[in-house]
Image (cartoon, rainbow, N blue to C red):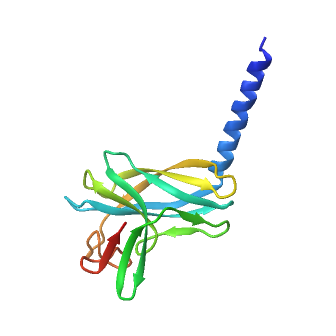
Amino acid sequence: MQTKLQHIALAIGILAGSTLAQAHDQVTIKDPWVRGTVAQQKATGAFMQISSDKEVRLIEAKAPAAIAGVVEIHEMAMDKDVMKMRQIKGLDIVPGKAAELKPGGYHVMLMDLKQQLKAGDTVPLTLTFEDSKTKARFSQEVKAPVNALGAGTTPMSGAGAMPAAGKSEHKH
């Protein structure tokens, strides 16, 4: 026979699990991918579409230390004729409107890469969100396939890609 304390603990556990499941279910991540790299390249980007049925904020991204030493949420924007990239503290996800993380815009920056990322590889990412109203935090795991480099492009060039050397500023 269970005691009243055991019943309460069980109820709290079920409620906590239910709340976590509801928070987790409110975010949808579509089409994640990571740009492939060449040997000795130390940075690349991860891209995806994020939507939510509630107001949330992407506040952190992580990758295993064996893949990247530093992972940050970044924004790229044109300032006059110069493409500037900078770390941002978070990215608001508005209900009913997908936030598109794409080359030349918002993205997850993987830096201090520990190995070359090749087509066919998968990069596990952990994205942490904060509910805008309750401030509750929750994480979602993403497995992002690595895309091959396209013909005639390099990892940091090509249509819609990150800026070429000499045309960007990366400030923190």
From the viewer's perspective, tell me whether residue 56 is left or right of residue 74.
right
Question: Residue placed at 48% from the left, 54% from the top?
Answer: 60
Q: Identify which residue is drawn at 72% across, 31% down.
A: 12
Q: 118 and 74: which one is in front?
A: 74
Point out the residue furthest to the top here.
1
- Please name whichever residue, 93 or 35, is drawn nearer the observer in this view of the structure: 93
Q: Which residue is drawn at 25% across and 59% down?
A: 42
Residue 36 in view (yes/no): no
Please tell me whether residue 153 is drawn above or below residue 47 in the rendered image: below
| Residue 46 visible here | yes
Please tell me whether residue 76 is drawn above or below residue 118 in the rendered image: below
Residue 153, percent from left and from top: 27, 74
- The percent position of residue 3, horizontal first and vertical second, equals 78, 15
Quadrant of the drawing holding the C terminus: bottom left
Q: Name the residue: 32% across, 64% down.
A: 148
In this rendering, would 50 be left or right of 84? right
